[in-house]
Amino acid sequence: MILSIVIIVSLLIVFVLIDFRGAMQKDLKELKNQSLSEKFSEIVKKINNDFFENEGEIVELSIREFNLVSKREIVIFQYSSGHLSIRYENHSRMNKSFYHEQEFRNIRNITLNGQIAISEAMIKGMCDVVEKELLVS
């Protein structure tokens, strides 16, 4: 009985690892001809325009990660297995830091409207966290 459970659990782990490796290979194939910032260019443009007043600068870190940097603020984009994680960090003048983070799943083939929706959701969260921090300060 215990041996059967161990075999089943082991097979599940193997299948999960194979699926994850396949997703990572899809990422590499997908990002072979365009950078991550190019793939999600509409999200980057909208956040840079609407939140950073076009003062943000893209810093490519790896095939799966880049930053959008502006003064004391940074937006970190990380992509893995078809999922995008976006984290906004604000390092204020008063030696206080605060952040907002969201993960967007299964966006390998995202549309233009999908990118706009993600950027709007992210900007709303970023504005909310800044507003909350200003009220506390």
Image (cartoon, helix red, strand yellow):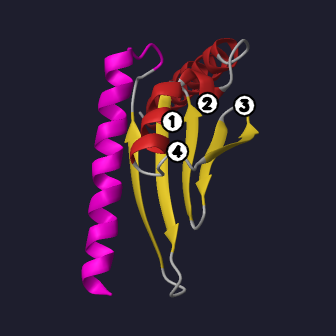
Q: Which residue is mark 2?
A: 37
Disc 4 or 2, which lies upstream in sequence?
Answer: 2
Q: Which residue is mark 1?
A: 44
Marks 3/1: CA–CA distance: 16 Å
User: The magenta stretch spans which residues?
Assistant: 108-137
Amino acid type of the residue that numbered disc 3 sits on in the rendered structure: Ile
- Label 2 Cα crowd, 10 Å radius (few <14 / some 14-19 / many 20+): many
- Label 3 Cα crowd, 10 Å radius (few <14 / some 14-19 / many 20+): some
Check if residue 136 falls in the magenta segment: yes
Amino acid type of the residue that numbered disc 1 sits on in the rendered structure: Val
Disc 3 or 1, which lies upstream in sequence?
Answer: 1
Amino acid type of the residue that numbered disc 2 sits on in the rendered structure: Ser
Disc 2 or 3, which lies upstream in sequence?
Answer: 2
Where's the C terminus, which quadrant?
bottom left
Marks 2/1: CA–CA distance: 7 Å
Which of labels 3 and 1 is toward the front? 1
Amino acid type of the residue that numbered disc 4 sits on in the rendered structure: Asn
Q: In front here: 103 or 98?
A: 98
